[in-house]
Amino acid sequence: MGDNLKGFVLALLSSAFIGASFIIKKKGLKRAAAASGVRAGVGGYSYLLEPLWWTGMITMIVGEVANFVAYAFAPAVLVTPLGALSIIVSAVLAHFMLKEKLHFLGILGCVMCIAGSIVIVIHAPQERAITSVQEIWSLATQTAFLLYVASVVILVFVLVFHFGPRYGHSNVLVFTGICSLMGSLSVMSVKALGTALKLTFEGTNQLVSPETWFFMLVVLTCVVTQMNYLNKALDIFNTAIVSPIYYVMFTTLTILASIIMFKDWDGQSAGSIISEICGFIVVLSGTVLLHVTKDYDISTPRSVYAPLSPSLSTRLCNENGEFLKHVDEEMPSPEEMCLRRQDL
């Protein structure tokens, strides 16, 4: 079995576990909030005493371990977009377990994610041969990647200390942005650490190199930050909103970081690169479609005075930090509209 195929299979398993973990953790957060009266989104940590939340966390860890190993065998351009499959798992489970309806257009979005992922897998570049962790360190310390790292650190600090306190509870992009930015750095470090362990198991000990332990420290720092802000986002916003937005931002930034650091597209033909980009766009379109149509019930006739669906900006930035899950609740009844017409 080739390295790319091994990475592909591990990425599929990872998506299944991670997608399920979103739902399990969401139910754990709800149960903890009901028991303590303090939600994670406002600084509560009662979920740490909730067994269901830990079940979700263990499920996510299993998925992340599979993802970790996948990066050691395949390039990030192949592994990362397959995370779209975790969105499908999350959306389907949310439909049955959290009663968050998945309608026809949402199913179409899932199909688009699968189709785009297949295109990416077919045209993905082969993993470049790396013989030591020092080689990865030289890639990580090149000028272009150092500029990317500096930009990420600055943006994270701005989001955490400026935008977080002001807009974190009303705009889903704040907390998911922090997770995505840190996630792009964690993936690069995970790939470096995974490659070091792979070389060690093959007989070339990389654990004696200080660069290996530095990458491990970066992984731990990024993962802890990601988990903290992901919990806040999941507690405040709808799961089917957080999952696709997090995926789109995280995948885009990770692929960008991988192209800069590992030069994944070097040596590929223009046709293959264009195919990968098109596949990625299809995946992104599928996630957006799944997100935008999440609460739109096509089976319910609407008044000509009612909008077909709430605007994206309203969903992302409601003043109370809550989403308009039922548009019909805010629309006037037929009797009220008749009275208004009579008054006019």
Image: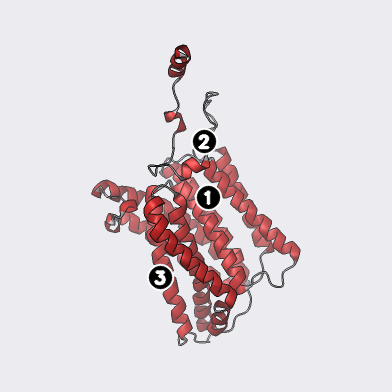
Q: Secondary structure at mark 2?
A: loop
- Give the residue type that dot 3 points to: Thr
* Residue 208 appears in the picture as rendered: yes
Q: Residues within 10 Å of mark 1 (few under 14, many from 20)?
A: many
From the top left corner, tell me how far across and down residue 58 is, in percent.
Answer: 38, 61
Q: Residues within 10 Å of mark 2 (few under 14, many from 20)?
A: many
Q: Which residue is mark 3?
A: 221
- Give the residue type that dot 1 points to: Ile
Quadrant holding the N terminus: bottom right
| Residue at position x 67%, y 60% in the image | 276
| Residue at position x 39%, y 60% in the image | 161
**Rounded to the nearest whole Å, what is the CA distance between mark 1 and mark 2?**
18 Å
| Residue at position x 55%, y 23% in the image | 304
Q: Between label 1 and label 3, give the one nearer the viewer.
A: 3
Nearer to me, 295 or 19: 295
| Residue at position x 54%, y 74% in the image | 146
From the top left corner, tell me how far across and down residue 131 is, in percent.
Answer: 59, 84
Q: Secondary structure at mark 3?
A: helix
Q: Circles 1 and 2: CB distance less than 8 Å?
A: no
Q: Residue furthest top?
A: 342
Q: Between label 2 and label 3, give the one nearer the viewer.
A: 3
Q: Which mark is residue 296?
A: 2
Count of residue discs: 3
Nearer to me, 280 or 154: 154
Q: Secondary structure at mark 1?
A: helix
Mark 1 vs mark 3: which is more N-terminal?
1
Q: Circles 2 and 3: CB distance less than 8 Å?
A: no
Q: Is residue 232 left or right of residue 241?
A: left
Q: Is residue 129 above or below residue 83?
A: below
Q: Which residue is mark 1?
A: 88
